[in-house]
Image: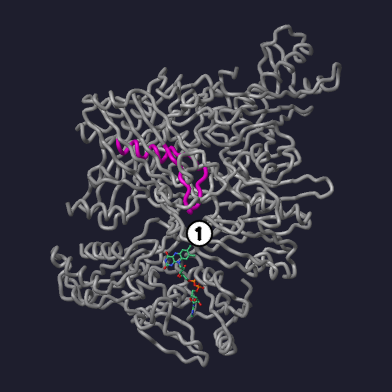
C-alpha cells in the first residue's frame, strides 16, 4: 500500500483538496477501519487519501443537540455516540447500534460518516440512522450543502449518491414527537460472536408511543438483508395507530411478514439467504413484545 | 524423590516471562532482524488442482530481487513423515496451499512485487474433494510420491484395532445406537503468524534457523534430510512463540524454502506469513467422519463400540494422518468397555492437509462417543449422569488396549461436575431454551511413547553466586513450563525464583528432548529436572558435609542455605568451595529421564503413557430458537491433574482450552469449496473473543500419581477435549434435536429445529 496522504486542517482546505483531485483517484479517510482493508486489496500507487482526522470543525466532529434536531458530525466516533446522553435516552436504537459495533478499539476510531459512506448492507449505525429517518447533509467543493433523506443516500451495495466533488458533512436526526411519552427503540444484531461481529442480519426499530399506548410514529431499518439497508416502510406504517400494549400473535406475524417483503438477502459464507429470512422474520416478531 | 512439605509447588507463581511479554520486550520471530537480511516470499498456486508452466524471468529482473527459485533450481528430498511432500511443486499442483516459487529480496514490498511478476499458466484439472470419491475405481492417483502400501493407491494411512468379542457383546446389548458424525477443519489461529529466519554461512557451511518449531530435535533431523545436510550442521534457536497448539509439530515447506533462499544467497532470509497465508497454509485440525455403533446392556453397562473413521488426508501427509493413535484410545478406553473394534483410513484428496492440534483427534472422538452415550441413555430411559458414573474408569483398571490406570480420577471428575452443575435452570420462555450436557475425556498424561524415546534431558548448574541455571531439552510455547521448572528448582534447592534461569531454546546447547506435545512437558521435563537435582544434591551434600563437619547426608535446602538441625552454610559458599578448592568440581549435573511407558505392539496394545489424565465437564447452554444462537452459560470443569503444580497457570490452561473448545463446538470452521478456501480471515473465521468467554468453574482433582513430578499429570490438552461434546449434548438436550456435525452454527440449529417441527 503506497499512496499519498493530504491532511487538511479545516473545511476550506478540505474543499480545496477535493477540488484539486477531481481528475485523479482519491479517497476520503476518516477512521480507516473500512478504508484500509479495502485499499490493501487494490493497487494504490496513484491514489491520494484525504485524511479528515485533523480537521478542526465543530459541524464535522461534534454532536449538537438542538430543539428540533440532533446534528451528528460525520467524524463523530461510535464511542462518542455511545457516551452521549441525549442519544442514549432519546435514540436508543442508535446508541445500541454503536455500542455493539466491533470492539472498544474499533469503536474509538470508527466514525458514523464512514459507516454511512461505506454503504455496507450490514452497517450497524447506518441501519439505526435509517430507522430514525435521518437526513444526510452533503457538502460540495464550493461549500454548497445538499440535504438528502438517508434512504436515498444509499444507491446500491457500497455505493452512495455522493458525487465526486462532495463529502458527507453531517447527519440530522429529527427529534421525537412532543406527544411521545414512551419510546420503544432498540437495535437487534444477529451474528455468532459477542464482539468483532459483522451483522448477519440486523434490525433497528424506533417506535414512538403516546401516553395512551398508541403508536404515533415508527421507523424500521433492516440490515444485511438486501443490497442496501432498507427502510421497512409498510411494516412501520402498519404499527401506527395500534396500541403497544395489546399486540397479538397475529399482529406480530403480520408485522414480521411486512418486514420480510423488504428482504432479498444473499447467501454467502456467513449465512444462507434462507437463514437470513428466517431470522429476520423471527426477530421482527420479537420487536412487538 | 521430591520433597513433601511444599513451599513453592502448588502456589500461584506468575509466569516467569510475564513482564517481558506484557511490556512488548519479548523477542518473537517477527522481531528478529539480522544484518544484511533479505525478505522471502512464497508464490502459491491459484488453483487447487492444475498443471502449470512458470516463467520467473521478469521477477528476477526487478531491482532488489536477489534470488528466485522454483522446483527446477533446488535439489531436495521430500518432506513429511511419509516423505510424500515436495518442498516446491513441479508442473502440477494438488492443493490450494501448493508452493510453486519463492523470492528473496531486499524488502518485503519488493519481494511481494516480484511474486506478481512471476507468470504462471495453469491448466485447471478436476480435483477430488471428497475422500470417498478418491477410492472410486478410475480415480486418478493424487499423490505420486506415496508408497502405495495399502489396497488403494489413494490411501495414505490405515489403522486397525480391536479388543474383546464384539459379536458376543452385541448380543448382550439391550440398546444399540449407530450414527455418523462429521467434524470440521479448525485452524489454530495463532496470534503470531508462522515465521522463520534462516542464516546460512557459506564459509562454515552451517545453517542457523530461528524457528518456532515445537520439536527442535526432530525438526533438525527433518530439515537436514530435506536439504541433504548433516543434522548437526543445523542449529535451531527458538524465539518466543506467539501460539503453538500443535501447529508447529511438523515442518512445512516454507521452512526449508527459507533455508534454501539463504543457502542460495549466503544472506539471512526471513519469511513471515501474512494472516491470509496463515489461514491458508498452516495446518488444521484433522477433519473426519466418524461412523460409530455402540451398545449398552439393560443395566446401562457399555458393551461394545464399532468405529470406522474416514479422514480427508489432503494432498500430502502430515501428523493429522496419525491422529487415530489418540482417537482409538478414546473409543477403546474411555469408560470401561468389554469390546471395541476400530478402523481408520486417511485418504488423499485435493484438499489441504491437517496437522496436529491440541487434543490430537481426541475432541473429534469424544464428540462422537459422548453424543452416542446420550443417545444410549435416552433409549434406555436412563439418567445421563448416572450412565456415565456407572461406566466411569476406575483406579487399577487395565483397559482392553492395555492402558494401565494406576491412578484415575474419572469418577471423581464426573461426580464433581454433576454435583456442582446441579439441575439445569428452567427455560424462561419458549424462545430461549436451556440445556445441560456432560462429557468426559481420557488423554495421555505422562507423555506418549510414539518416537524411539519419549525422554527429556536436563543439565542443572549452580554458579558461585548461588544462582541456578536449568538447561532443559524441553520447549516453552507459552504454556508456562519454564515457570514450573523454575518452581521445581526453587522448591528443591531453596533458591529464590528470581535467581533461577531457564535455558531451553538452542539445539547446540540443550540436551535432547522429543518435543512439546502430548501434554508432556511438565511431566517429562519436570521428572528430568528432579533427576538432575538429585544428582547435583549428592555432590552438594558431600561438600556441605565436609564444610559443616557433618556426617549425615540429609540436609534441608532452604532460603539459600544448606541446613541440618543445628548448623547451616550458604549454598553459594558451598558452590565456591566446590569450584575453587580441591578436587575442584563443578556444581553441575545432567540427567536423562525416560518415562516408564511402553511401545504399543502392532495391534496398538500397550501402556503408551506414564500416566493418564481424566476430565469431565458439565455445560449449561441457552439456545435462542429465533436465531439459533447458542449461549454457553456455565462450564464446570473437573480434571484429574494428579497434583496442582501452579494453580494460576493451570487456570490459564483451563480457560484457554475451554474457550478453544467452545469455538470448536459453535463457530470455528475453515470453509472450503472445491478446494478453494472461502474464509481466510478473522472476519469470517469465527475465532471467539474474550467477550464470548462463559463462566468457567474449575475443580482440580488430585490423584497424586507416583509417576509424575510431585504426583502431577499432563494438563494442557484436556480442557478442550470434552467441551464440544458437552456443548453438543447440552444443545440437543435443550431442543430435543440431533446434532451430527460441528460447529453447531446458528443456521444448523435452525435447520435442525425446522426438521424436527416438520416431522
Ligand atoms: C474488525 C472490524 C469490525 C467491524 N465491525 C463492524 C460492526 O460491527 N458494525 C459495522 O457497522 N461496521 C463494522 N466494521 C466496519 C467499520 O468499522 C465501520 O463501517 C466504521 O463505521 C467505518 O468508519 P471509519 O471512520 O473507519 O471509515 P473509513 O474506513 O475511514 O471510511 C469508510 C468509507 O467511507 C468513506 N468516508 C468516510 N468518511 C467520509 C466522509 N465524511 N465523506 C465521504 N466519504 C467518507 C471513505 O472514503 C471510505 O470509503 C468493522 C470493521 C472492522 C475492521
Mark 1 sits near ligand 1, with its Cβ under 8 Å away: no
| Residue B663 seen in render | no
Q: Is B382 within the magenta? A: no
Provide residue B681's location: percent of width, then percent of height. 49, 59
Residue at 60% x, 89% y is A20
* Residue farthest toward the front in the current orientation of the protein: B138
> The N terminus of chain B is located in which quarter?
top right
Residue at 74% x, 67% y is B64
| Residue A36 seen in render | yes
Which chain does the numbered disc 1 sit on?
B
Asked which secondary structure carries label 1, the reply is loop
Above or below, B508 relative to B242: above
Provide residue B592's location: percent of width, then percent of height. 66, 24
Q: In this view, does B430 lie to the left or right of A30?
A: left
Q: Mark 1 points at which residue?
A: B48
Provide residue B593's location: percent of width, then percent of height. 63, 24
Q: Is B371 within the magenta? A: yes
Q: How crowded is mark 1: few (under 14 residues within 10 Å), some or many (20 or more)?
A: many
Provide residue B598's location: percent of width, then percent of height. 53, 23
Magenta-drawn segment: B344-372
Closer-to-camera residue (B145/B690): B145
Above or below, B497 relative to B594: below
Residue at 70% x, 31% y is B511
Closer-to-camera residue (A137/A223): A223
Amino acid at each position: 500500500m503506497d499512496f499519498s496522504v493530504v491532511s487538511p486542517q479545516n473545511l476550506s482546505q478540505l474543499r480545496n483538496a477535493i477540488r484539486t483531485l477531481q481528475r485523479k483517484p482519491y479517497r476520503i479517510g476518516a477512521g480507516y477501519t473500512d478504508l484500509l482493508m479495502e485499499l490493501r486489496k487494490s493497487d494504490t500507487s496513484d491514489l491520494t487519501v484525504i485524511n479528515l482526522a485533523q480537521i478542526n470543525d465543530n459541524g464535522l466532529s461534534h454532536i449538537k443537540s438542538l430543539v428540533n434536531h440532533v446534528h451528528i458530525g460525520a467524524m463523530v466516533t461510535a464511542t462518542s455516540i455511545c457516551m452521549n446522553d441525549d442519544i442514549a435516552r432519546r435514540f436508543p436504537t442508535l446508541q445500541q447500534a454503536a455500542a455493539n459495533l466491533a470492539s472498544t478499539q474499533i469503536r474509538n476510531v470508527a466514525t458514523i460518516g464512514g459507516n454511512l459512506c461505506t454503504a455496507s448492507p450490514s452497517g450497524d449505525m447506518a441501519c439505526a440512522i435509517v430507522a430514525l429517518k435521518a437526513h444526510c447533509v452533503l457538502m460540495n467543493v464550493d461549500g454548497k450543502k445538499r440535504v438528502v433523506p438517508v434512504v436515498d443516500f444509499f444507491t446500491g451495495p457500497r455505493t452512495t449518491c455522493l458525487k465526486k466533488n462532495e463529502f458527507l458533512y453531517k447527519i440530522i436526526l429529527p427529534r421525537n414527537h412532543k406527544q411521545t411519552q414512551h419510546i420503544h427503540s432498540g437495535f437487534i444484531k444477529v451474528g455468532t460472536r459477542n464482539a468483532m461481529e459483522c451483522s448477519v442480519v440486523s434490525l433497528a426499530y424506533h417506535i414512538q408511543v403516546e401516553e395512551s399506548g398508541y403508536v404515533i410514529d415508527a421507523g424500521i431499518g433492516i440490515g444485511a438483508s438486501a443490497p442496501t439497508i432498507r427502510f421497512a416502510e409498510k411494516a412501520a406504517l402498519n404499527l401506527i395507530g395500534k396500541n403497544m400494549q395489546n399486540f397479538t400473535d397475529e399482529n406480530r406475524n403480520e408485522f414480521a411478514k411486512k418486514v420480510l417483503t423488504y428482504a432479498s438477502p444473499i447467501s454467502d459464507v456467513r449465512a444462507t439467504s434462507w437463514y437470513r429470512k428466517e431470522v429476520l422474520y423471527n426477530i421482527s416478531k420479537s420487536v412487538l413484545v | 524423590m521430591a520433597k513433601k512439605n511444599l513451599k513453592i509447588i502448588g502456589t500461584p507463581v506468575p509466569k516467569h516471562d510475564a513482564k517481558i511479554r506484557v511490556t512488548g520486550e519479548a523477542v518473537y520471530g517477527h522481531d528478529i532482524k539480522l544484518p544484511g537480511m533479505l525478505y522471502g516470499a512464497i508464490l502459491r498456486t491459484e488453483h487447487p488442482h492444475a498443471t502449470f508452466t512458470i516463467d520467473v524471468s521478469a521477477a528476477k529482473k526487478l531491482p532488489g530481487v536477489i534470488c528466485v527459485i522454483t522446483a527446477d533450481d533446488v535439489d531436495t528430498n521430500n518432506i513429511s513423515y511419509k516423505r510424500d511432500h515436495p518442498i516446491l511443486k513441479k508442473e502440477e499442483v494438488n492443493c490450494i496451499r501448493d508452493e510453486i516459487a519463492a523470492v528473496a529480496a531486499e524488502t518485503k514490498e519488493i519481494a511481494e512485487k516480484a511474486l506478481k511478476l512471476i507468470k504462471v499458466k495453469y491448466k485447471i484439472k478436476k480435483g477430488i474433494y471428497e475422500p470417498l470419491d478418491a477410492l472410486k475405481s478410475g480415480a486418478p492417483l493424487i499423490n505420486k510420491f506415496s508408497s502405495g502400501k495399502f489396497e488403494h493407491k489413494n490411501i495414505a494411512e490405515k489403522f486397525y484395532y480391536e479388543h474383546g468379542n464384539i459379536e458376543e457383546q452385541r448380543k448382550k446389548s439391550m440398546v444399540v445406537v449407530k450414527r455418523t458424525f462429521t467434524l470440521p477443519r479448525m485452524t489454530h489461529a495463532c496470534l503470531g503468524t508462522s515465521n522463520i529466519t534462516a542464516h546460512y554461512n557459506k564459509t562454515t557451511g552451517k545453517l542457523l534457523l530461528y524457528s518456532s518449531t515445537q520439536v527442535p530435535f526432530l525438526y533438525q533431523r527433518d530439515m537436514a534430510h530435506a536439504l541433504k545436510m548433516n543434522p548437526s550442521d543445523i542449529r535451531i534457536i527458538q524465539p518466543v512463540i506467539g501460539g503453538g497448539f500443535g501447529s508447529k509439530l511438523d515442518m512445512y515447506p516454507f521452512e526449508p524454502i527459507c533455508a534454501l533462499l539463504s543457502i542460495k544467497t549466503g544472506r539471512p532470509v526471513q519469511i513471515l506469513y501474512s494472516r491470509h497465508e496463515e489461514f491458508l497454509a498452516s495446518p488444521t485440525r484433522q477433519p473426519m467422519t466418524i461412523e460409530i455403533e455402540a451398545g449398552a446392556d439393560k443395566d446401562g453397562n457399555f458393551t461394545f463400540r464399532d468405529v470406522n473413521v474416514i479422514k480427508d488426508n489432503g494432498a500430502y501427509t502430515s501428523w493429522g494422518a496419525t491422529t487415530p493413535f489418540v482417537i482409538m484410545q478414546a473409543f477403546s478406553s474411555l469408560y470401561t468397555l468389554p469390546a471395541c473394534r476400530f478402523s481408520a483410513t486417511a485418504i488423499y484428496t485435493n484438499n489441504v492437509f491437517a496437522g496436529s492440534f491440541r487434543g490430537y483427534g481426541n475432541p473429534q472422538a469424544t464428540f462422537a462417543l459422548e453424543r452416542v452415550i446420550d443417545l444410549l441413555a435416552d433409549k434406555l430411559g436412563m439418567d445421563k449422569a448416572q450412565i456415565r458414573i456407572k461406566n466411569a474408569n476406575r483406579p487399577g483398571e487395565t483397559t482392553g488396549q492395555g492402558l494401565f490406570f494406576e491412578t484415575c480420577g474419572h469418577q471423581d471428575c464426573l461426580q464433581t461436575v454433576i454435583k456442582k452443575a446441579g439441575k439445569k435452570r428452567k427455560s424462561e420462555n419458549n424462545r430461549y431454551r436451556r440445556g445441560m450436557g456432560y462429557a468426559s475425556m481420557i488423554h495421555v498424561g505422562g507423555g506418549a511413547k510414539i518416537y524411539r524415546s519419549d525422554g527429556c534431558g536436563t543439565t542443572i548448574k549452580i554458579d558461585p553466586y548461588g544462582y541456578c541455571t536449568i538447561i532443559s531439552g524441553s520447549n516453552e510455547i507459552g504454556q508456562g513450563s519454564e515457570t514450573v521448572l523454575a518452581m521445581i528448582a526453587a522448591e528443591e534447592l531453596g533458591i529464590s525464583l528470581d535467581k533461577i534461569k531457564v535455558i531451553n531454546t538452542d539445539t547446540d546447547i540443550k540436551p535432547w528432548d522429543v518435543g512439546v506435545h502430548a501434554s508432556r512437558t511438565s511431566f517429562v521435563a519436570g521428572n528430568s529436572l528432579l533427576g538432575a537435582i538429585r544428582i547435583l544434591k549428592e555432590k552438594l551434600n558431600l561438600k556441605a558435609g565436609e564444610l559443616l563437619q557433618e556426617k549425615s547426608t540429609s540436609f534441608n535446602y532452604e532460603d539459600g542455605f544448606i541446613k541440618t538441625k543445628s548448623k547451616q552454610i550458604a549454598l553459594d559458599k558451598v558452590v565456591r568451595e566446590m569450584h575453587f578448592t580441591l578436587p575442584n568440581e563443578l556444581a553441575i549435573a545432567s540427567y536423562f529421564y525416560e518415562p516408564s511407558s511402553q511401545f504399543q505392539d502392532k495391534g496398538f496394545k500397550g501402556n503408551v503413557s506414564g500416566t493418564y489424565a481424566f476430565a469431565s465437564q458439565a455445560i449449561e447452554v441457552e439456545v435462542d430458537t429465533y436465531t439459533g444462537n447458542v449461549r454457553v452459560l456455565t462450564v464446570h470443569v473437573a480434571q484429574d491433574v494428579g497434583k496442582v503444580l501452579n494453580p494460576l497457570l493451570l487456570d490459564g490452561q483451563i480457560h484457554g482450552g475451554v474457550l478453544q473448545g467452545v469455538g470448536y463446538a459453535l463457530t470455528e470452521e475453515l470453509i472450503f469449496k472445491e478446494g478453494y478456501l472461502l474464509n481466510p480471515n478473522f472476519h469470517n473465521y469465527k475465532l471467539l473473543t474474550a467477550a464470548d468467554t462463559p463462566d468457567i468453574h474449575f475443580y482440580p482433582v488430585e490423584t497424586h500419581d507416583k509417576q509424575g513430578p510431585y504426583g502431577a499429570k499432563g494438563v494442557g490438552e484436556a480442557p478442550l477435549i470434552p467441551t464440544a461434546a458437552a456443548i453438543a449434548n447440552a444443545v440437543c438436550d435443550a431442543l430435543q434435536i440431533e446434532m451430527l456435525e460441528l460447529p453447531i452454527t446458528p443456521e444448523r440449529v435452525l435447520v435442525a429445529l425446522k426438521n424436527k417441527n416438520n416431522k
